[in-house]
Amino acid sequence: DGVMLDVLYFKGHDASPSSPTVIRLNGNAEAYELQDELLPSTYSHSGYNFMMFNYRGVGRSQWSHLFGSDLAGHLWGLWRMPAICGGVLDAWTLIQFATKALHVKPEEVVVIGHSIGGGFGTKLAAQRPDLPFVLCNSRSFGTLS
């Protein structure tokens, strides 16, 4: 949908880009800049590729520009896309990047959702049963409604 996501990618020790990959979905009001610096190394030292990102509108992830304006694009994006839909779409985008661009097998994509990120991951898994990714939730929600 034209949104540019700010993503950090950490290659796993002795891993190729198509090796098993962990994608972290942040909780509410979390940016990857606020995460413990040991988080990526925990996975990469174990041989897993690791990705973490900021949702649209957080940090350097931004909505599409509108009439050349960041602010207009941000306001338009908030109006047309509820936060839940945007978070799920952002998670799907990262999974698609891992499977299509990096050639990770879908069953070797591990999505770790924290708090509302777990809700986004669960909703995505329910909407896309054709994507056999592994989902692990930490202190998450039973519903997003």
Image (cartoon, grey):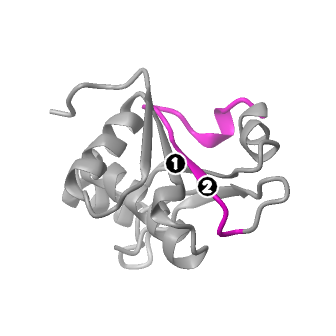
Quadrant housing the N terminus? bottom left
Q: Does the residue at mark 1 contact the one at mark 2 (Cβ under 8 Å)?
A: yes
Foreground of the two, 62 or 15: 15
- Classify residue 24 by image quadrant: top right
The disc label shown at residue 110, or none:
1
User: What segment is highlighted magenta in the picture?
Assistant: 17-37
Is 83 positioned to the left or the right of 136 in the image?
left
Is 24 within the magenta? Answer: yes
- Classify residue 140 by image quadrant: top left
Is 79 positioned to the left or the right of 71 in the image?
left
Is 116 within the magenta? Answer: no
Q: Secondary structure at mark 1?
A: strand
Dot 2 crowding, Cα within 10 Å, few <14, some 14–19, many 20+: many
Vertical arrangement, residue 30 with respect to residue 22, above or below = above
Quadrant housing the C terminus? top left
Q: Which is the main secondary structure of the residues drawn in magenta?
A: loop
The amino acid on which the numbered mark 1 sits, given as a three-letter code, is: Val
In the orientation shown, which residue stands out farthest toward the left? 145
What percent of the width, then of the height, locates residue 104? Answer: 57, 68
Q: Residue at x 65, y 69 (%)?
A: 18
Task: Work out how far the residue at label 1 is from the one at label 2, CA to CA, in angstroms.
Answer: 6 Å
What percent of the width, then of the height, locates residue 59? Answer: 57, 49
What percent of the width, then of the height, locates residue 83? Answer: 29, 46
The disc label shown at residue 21, or none:
2
What percent of the width, then of the height, locates residue 10? Answer: 74, 55
